[in-house]
Image (cartoon, rainbow, N blue to C red):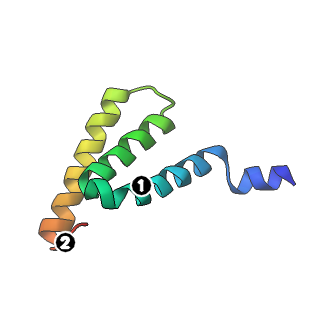
Amino acid sequence: GDNVFQYLLPKDVLAILSLLLVYCIVLPHLHFIASSYLFMVIGMIYLHRGKSIVRSLIYSAIALLLLVLVFRYLFLVILP
């Protein structure tokens, strides 16, 4: 019953899946960099339970920079 559902889809997984759905909806409007940055920041703040907000902002910026550099300039992928 409920225990199986909670085991298969814990609250954190449902929260991140919901955030991912919002990301997919927002992506065409805010474009890749802004949408991805917001997704990462909000996800990290949520998973850290509101602690280390500044660290989440910085780590998200570094991760996004690395992703853009690797995919755009190394693999020559056109990002949305």
Q: Secondary structure at mark 1?
A: helix
Quarter of the picture holding the N terminus: bottom right
Checking the image for residue 78, the label placed there is 2
Across and down, in percent, residue 34 comes to: 27, 49
Across and down, in percent, residue 48 comes to: 48, 33
Q: Amino acid at mark 2?
A: Ile
The residue lying at 54 percent from left, 55 percent from top is: 17
The residue lying at 19 percent from left, 71 percent from top is: 78
Of the numbered discs 1 and 2, the one sitting upstream in the chain is: 1
How crowded pointer 2 is (Cα within 10 Å; few <14, some 14-19, many 20+) is rated as few
Across and down, in percent, residue 43 comes to: 44, 43
The residue lying at 24 percent from left, 58 percent from top is: 67
Q: Are marks 1 and 2 in contact (CB under 8 Å)?
A: no
The residue carrying mark 1 is 23
Report how far apart the C-alphas of labels 1 and 2 lie in the structure. 19 Å
Quarter of the picture holding the C terminus: bottom left
Left or right, residue 72 beside residue 44: left
Q: Amino acid at mark 1?
A: Tyr
Relative to 8, residue 57 above or below: above
The residue lying at 54 percent from left, 52 percent from top is: 18
**Residue closest to the eye, 19 or 50:** 19
